[in-house]
């Protein structure tokens, strides 16, 4: 599924403050003017449980684009789901 209208995207990124790939993912989203909601799983235990429940992953970053998970900083998958390029 490719996003046709970026305004209707629901993007959530699960992060920690020390994660360099999290920073890279957020920077990439900002460069493409993609709005996102950040969940710091080092401070938000319910957010951590939600991330693990949805994806089975305990590492970050995990990005949800309209509830479709992207594990790590996977630029090609993000591009496809976000309709970039």
Image (spheres, helix red, strand yellow):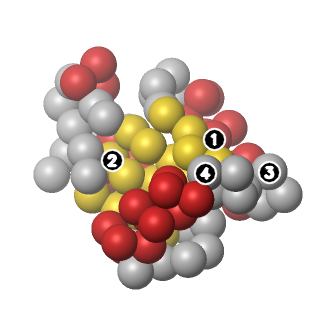
Q: Quadrant of residue 66?
A: top left
Q: Which mark is residue 44?
A: 4
Which residue bears the numbered disc 1?
26
> Within 10 angstroms of label 4, few (less than 14), some, or many (20 or more) residues?
few
For the residue pair 70 and 54, the one nearer the viewer reads as 54
- On the rendered structure, is 29 left or right of 34? right
- Depth-wise, is mark 3 or mark 1 nearer the camera? 3
> Which residue corresponds to the image point at 44% horizontal and 43% vertical from the top-left?
12
Nearer-N-terminus badge (2/3): 3
Determine whether the residue tagged by mark 3 lies in a helix, strand or loop. loop
Q: Position of residue 77 (x, y in %)?
A: 38, 60
Nearer-N-terminus badge (3/1): 3
The span from disc 4 to disc 3 (Cα, nearest Å) is 12 Å
Nearer-N-terminus badge (1/4): 1
The span from disc 2 to disc 3 (Cα, nearest Å) is 21 Å
Which residue bears the numbered disc 2?
65
> Within 10 angstroms of label 3, few (less than 14), some, or many (20 or more) residues?
few
Nearer-N-terminus badge (2/1): 1
Determine whether the residue tagged by mark 4 lies in a helix, strand or loop. loop
> Which residue corresponds to the image point at 22% horizontal and 37% vertical from the top-left?
3
> Which residue corresponds to the image point at 26% horizontal and 52% vertical from the top-left?
67
Which residue bears the numbered disc 3?
17
- Depth-wise, is mark 4 or mark 3 nearer the camera? 4
């Amino acid at each position: 599924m490719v996003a046709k209208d970026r305004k209707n995207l629901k993007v959530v990124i699960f992060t920690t403050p020390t994660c360099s790939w999290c920073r890279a993912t957020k920077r990439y989203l900002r460069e493409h003017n993609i709005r996102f909601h950040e969940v710091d799983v080092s401070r938000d235990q319910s957010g951590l449980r939600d991330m693990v429940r949805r994806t089975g992953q305990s590492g970050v970053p995990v990005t949800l684009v309209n509830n479709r998970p992207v594990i790590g900083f996977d630029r090609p998958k993000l591009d496809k789901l976000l309709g970039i390029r």
